[in-house]
Image (cartoon, helix red, strand yellow):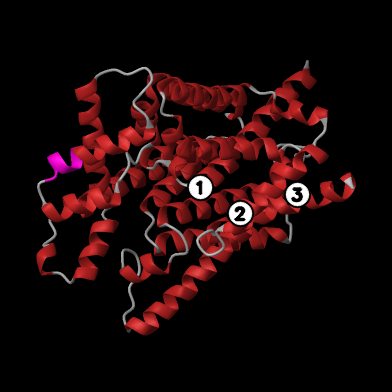
Amino acid sequence: MRILLAAIYPYVFLLLYLIIPFDNYIRALPNILLAILVITFPFIVKKRDFRKLKSLPFAIFLSLIVFLLLNSLISGRFEEDFNVIKKILIAIGLVVLYIPVIEDSSAGGRTEKINSAIIFSSLAAIIYSVYNFVLITHVDGNFALGESPQVIEALLIDRLYLGLLSTFSILISLRSIKRTYHPNNTYYLANIFINALFIILMASKIAMVALLVLILIRQFYGKRKIWKFGIATLSVVAIVGLFFLIRSYNNRQLETENLPQITTGFLESSMTYELRSVVWQCATNIIEKEGFSWTGSGFLATEDKLLDCYSETITNAKKRNSFIEEKFNTHSQFLDFYLSAGFIALILFLVFILVSFISVRKQFLPTALLSLLILYCAVENVFHRQIGAYYIGFILIVLMTSAKSNQNNRINEM
């Protein structure tokens, strides 16, 4: 029985990450697969498997979760905070559930099974989104890419998370390409091209910035060559140029009163830079008003304070009502941890990132994924959505297995 369960278990994990983008259409299936993993786990895990979790980054992240739970219990806001905390538990839980799948091989092989799921999941999401776009364009009779309503409506999931998934796929394909000739190299190169083109066509600005940052980071790995300095310089210039282009575009004064209602709603929802500037200003006002906090005021209480700030500071009635109805959160995981759980939670999260970087800095893939974690946490509350918890779980799996691999290598060299 155990042999059968052990054989099925990795494919359940693979299927989970394959269908995550389709969560809105098959909402119950990811939870069912997660439940199957939890129930099966005790029957196939071995005592020695838990040694794979013996790493400092894992211990620090676990400390963060313990603090969040104790802080909420002591403050009497456990029921209100648990909706967010349970998503953080999903992320770290995926790491624990993955340990029976980890192979005793190189760092790349340790996540090979889940890597394949990410690649096929990204391609499936792209095919679905393109098919939707064709249907919508045919019905509307108009063709427009980038920031068009057709693109936004056609996307399978939010542009931010679809861009993150495509970036995952590009990184995994880049990592999988062999230096010598291999027939699979053509497929990986094609996958990189398809995902990069899709990111550009759907105008995922954060994913574009992420790709440029990853190109810059890649120049610090492998043999040092003079042309790498040129690529690094161009990457920095492109990142700065893209930032100012995005800022200039979103700072334009839009005459929304004369626009159709559908177009107005689209423009309001797509101006992410303006949205975040308003939200971050309110978060800053709350910090200045309440002063330094060790334990924060709770995730739900932080949301209520932001709503109060929107009602007091946004003068445009239409925009104010939109912010209040949508209940926009801090749009920064770092700000969210500080306001909701205090300075201790923020420090634990930052220490986790720092220690993880020190542990995996010699490996490109985990370092690149850690950079994505930082970048997306800076502009999104990744633990406020279950899809965010799943994808952060993937990053944590790679980070933990890579950190453990480095530790084992040092032991072997002694």
Q: Could you say which quadrant of the image residue 282 lies in?
A: top left
Mark nearer the viewer, 3 or 2: 2
Q: CA distance from mark 3 to mark 2?
A: 15 Å
Residue with the mark numbered 2? 30
Q: Position of residue 326 (x, y in %)?
A: 29, 51
**Above or below for 386 versus 194:** above
Q: CA distance from mark 2 to mark 1?
A: 10 Å
Q: Compare residues 48 and 171 and report the one nearer the observer.
A: 48
Q: Which disc is residue 386 wearing?
A: 1
Quick check: marks 3 and 1 in contact, CB under 8 Å? no
Between discs 3 and 2, the one toward the N terminus: 3
Q: Position of residue 67 (x, y in %)?
A: 50, 22
In reply to whether residue 82 is colored magenta, the answer given is no
Q: Quadrant of the C terminus?
A: top right
> The residue tagged with tag 2: helix, strand or loop?
helix
Q: Which residues are magenta?
A: 309-314
Residue with the mark numbered 3? 10
At a point 13% along the width and 39% down the height, the residue shown is 312
Q: Which SS type dominates the magenta stretch? A: helix
